[in-house]
Amino acid sequence: QVQLVQSGADVKKPGASVKVSCKASGYTFTGYYMHWVRQAPGQGLEWMGWINPNSGDTNYAQEFQGRVTMTRDMSISTAYMELSSLRSDDTAVYYCARGDGSYSPDWGQGTLVAVSS
Amino acid sequence: DIQMTQSPSSLSASVGDRVTITCRASQSISSYLNWYQQKPGKAPKLLIYAASSLQNGVPSRFSGSGSGTDFTLTISSLQPEDFATYYCQQSYSTPQTFGQGTKLEIK
């Protein structure tokens, strides 16, 4: 069965960077896009972008352009999302989600990133 | 960006009720509309994709309809485990966008 296992919670200071990992298993990692979605406390879902694990191509939401970098390591079937210049309003749970065509049937468990001085 | 507007934002209903949640897109998105259910502290769960296709393993009391700009999610007979927050999502163009969510509570 498909599993997406994310790295653990992290606390960062404003201005720092965070890198969240998402290890995939149960399917061909390079065959499906990986999306990243975040959710601030008590708020809705916000799409951040996707990476094509096969080619490394990325597509980022304009809001995150210049601050987000999505990468992958095909040898260990892991996708990464790095967000820099962190602000307090970046405090959120970050999810990876496997893209199957135009929808995402499988999600990671989420990673809480707290930004606090 | 395509704006997705859900209504209502919250809804109180009883077990056994029929419930409908609507989602409107700011421009036509054909049938590129997905519905997710989220429970507190959990990741979203895909219920419906492509506006009306039921995801494997999802009970048949859930159904979706619509195309273009107007979509609905219907739960034919609410069960206790259905009380959660529901989100629509358009995947017609990037950035993919979500509705603000509909919180379904027990009456």
Image (cartoon, coloured by chain):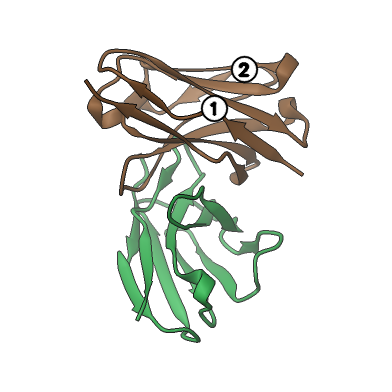
Tag 1 residue: A7
Q: Quadrant of the N terminus of chain B?
A: top left
- Residue, x 62% and y 38% (percent of image)? A99
Q: Amino acid at mark 1?
A: Ser
- Residue, x 31% and y 43% (percent of image)? A41
**Chain identifier of the brown chain:** A
Q: Closest to the observer: B30 or B22? A: B22
Residue A2 placement (x, y as % from top left): 72, 41
Q: Is residue B45 above or below residue A21?
A: below
Tag 2 residue: A72
Q: Amino acid at mark 2?
A: Arg
Q: Quadrant of the C terminus of chain B?
A: bottom left
Q: Is residue B5 above or below residue A79?
A: below
Q: What whole-number distance in Å separates the C-alpha atoms at marks 2 and 1?
A: 14 Å
Number of numbered discs visible in the structure rendering = 2
Q: Chain of mark 2?
A: A
Q: Quadrant of residue A71?
A: top right
Disc 2 vs disc 1: which is toward the camera?
1
The tag earlier along the polypeptide, 2 or 1, is: 1
Let me know if residue B8 appears in the view: no
Look at the image and give the colour of chain B. Answer: green
